[in-house]
Image (cartoon, rainbow, N blue to C red):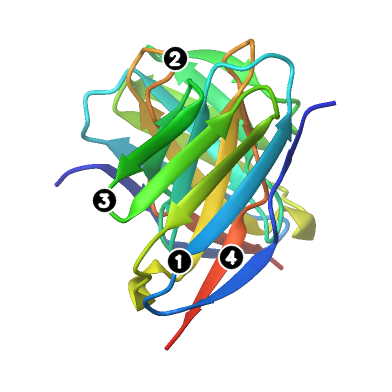
């Protein structure tokens, strides 16, 4: 298996549920990212990890909690979400140098009811 | 503030040529990326420009003018599979990516 894999592809959860999104990259990259994509809006950067260390947290509400146990795996733990959190959540990875391109997973389509 | 502008939607005919524009105002500039995203799929990297001029890659070309804060993606010999959203992103002076909202390209037979 190659590239960036995200599971699940679709998730429906109530506002009181707790769930986790998983991302795995098989590209040997050192940096991993969580993005939120809403319809007709620019990608919103949520979290960045370099060599397993969190280097960015773009004022994301605490109901989103990232975890990076190693440079190949990234999780996004979700709890007490709001309906406006419904969106496509994309994971991406890249090589260490600044102008290397991002490699994205297919995303998790999240619906909060 | 930082801003990227691209048209929301464009329509073109199979076999034709289409140009998707992107204008930007950012704090510094360290390169511009174009990505393609088919519905329900991952964005995939198309091109990177950091110097002025045209970069050609098969049917796709990307142009940059840093003095004008302007780029375009040129798609030739359009095919139905080119129907997708095209995302423009600029890397600012802090190497942060600033994204446009994307241009949805519809190809008609």
Q: Earlier in the sequence, mark 3 or mark 4?
A: 3
The residue closer to the viewer here, B22 or B83, is B22
- Residue A49 horizontal/vertical position (percent): 47, 19
Q: Are labels 3 and 1 on one chain?
A: yes
Residue A50 horizontal side relative to residue A44, left or right = left
Q: Earlier in the sequence, mark 3 or mark 1?
A: 1
Write down the residue under mark 4: B104
Q: Residues within 10 Å of mark 2 (few under 14, many from 20)?
A: few
Q: Nearer the viewer, mark 4 or mark 2?
A: 4
As helix, strand or loop, the secondary structure at mark 1 comes to loop
Q: CA distance from mark 1 to mark 4?
A: 15 Å
Within the image, what quadrant is residue A112 found in? bottom right
Q: CA distance from mark 3 to mark 1?
A: 13 Å
Within the image, what quadrant is residue B95 found in? top right
Residue A51 horizontal side relative to residue B89, left or right = left
Q: Nearer the viewer, mark 1 or mark 4?
A: 1
Q: Residues within 10 Å of mark 4 (few under 14, many from 20)?
A: many
Asked whether the beta carbons under mark 4 and mark 2 sit within 8 Å of each other, the answer is: no
- Above or below, A70 against A21 in this view is above
As helix, strand or loop, the secondary structure at mark 4 comes to strand
Regarding residue A88, the answer to whether it shows in the image is: yes
Q: Which mark is residue B58?
A: 3
As helix, strand or loop, the secondary structure at mark 3 comes to loop
- Residue B69 horizontal/vertical position (percent): 69, 29
Q: Earlier in the sequence, mark 1 or mark 4?
A: 1
Write down the residue under mark 1: B17
**Residue at (45%, 36%) from the top-left corner?**
A75
Asked whether the beta carbons under mark 2 and mark 3 sit within 8 Å of each other, the answer is: no
Number of disc labels: 4
Q: CA distance from mark 3 to mark 4?
A: 21 Å
**Residue at (37%, 23%) from the top-left corner?**
A100
Write down the residue under mark 2: A98
């Amino acid at each position: 298996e190659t590239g960036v894999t995200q599971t699940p592809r679709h998730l429906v959860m109530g506002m009181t549920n707790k769930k986790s999104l998983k991302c795995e990259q098989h590209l040997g990259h050192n940096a991993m990212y969580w993005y939120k994509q809403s319809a007709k809006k620019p990608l919103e950067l949520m979290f960045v990890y370099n060599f397993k260390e969190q280097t960015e947290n773009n004022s994301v509400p605490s109901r989103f909690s990232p975890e990076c146990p190693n440079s190949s795996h990234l999780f996004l733990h979700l709890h007490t979400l709001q309906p406006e959190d419904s969106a496509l959540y994309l994971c991406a990875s890249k090589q260490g140098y600044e102008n290397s391109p991002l490699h994205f997973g297919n995303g998790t389509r999240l619906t909060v009811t | 503030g930082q801003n990227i502008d691209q048209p929301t939607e464009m329509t073109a005919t199979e076999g034709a040529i289409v140009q998707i524009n992107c204008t930007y105002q950012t704090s510094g500039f360290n390169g511009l990326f174009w990505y393609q995203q088919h519905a329900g799929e991952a964005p995939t990297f198309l091109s990177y420009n950091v110097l002025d001029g045209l970069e050609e890659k098969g049917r796709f070309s990307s142009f940059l003018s840093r003095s004008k804060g302007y780029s375009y993606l040129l798609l030739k010999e359009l095919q139905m599979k080119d129907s997708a959203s095209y995302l423009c992103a600029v890397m600012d002076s802090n190497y942060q990516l600033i994204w446009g909202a994307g241009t949805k390209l519809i190809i008609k037979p």
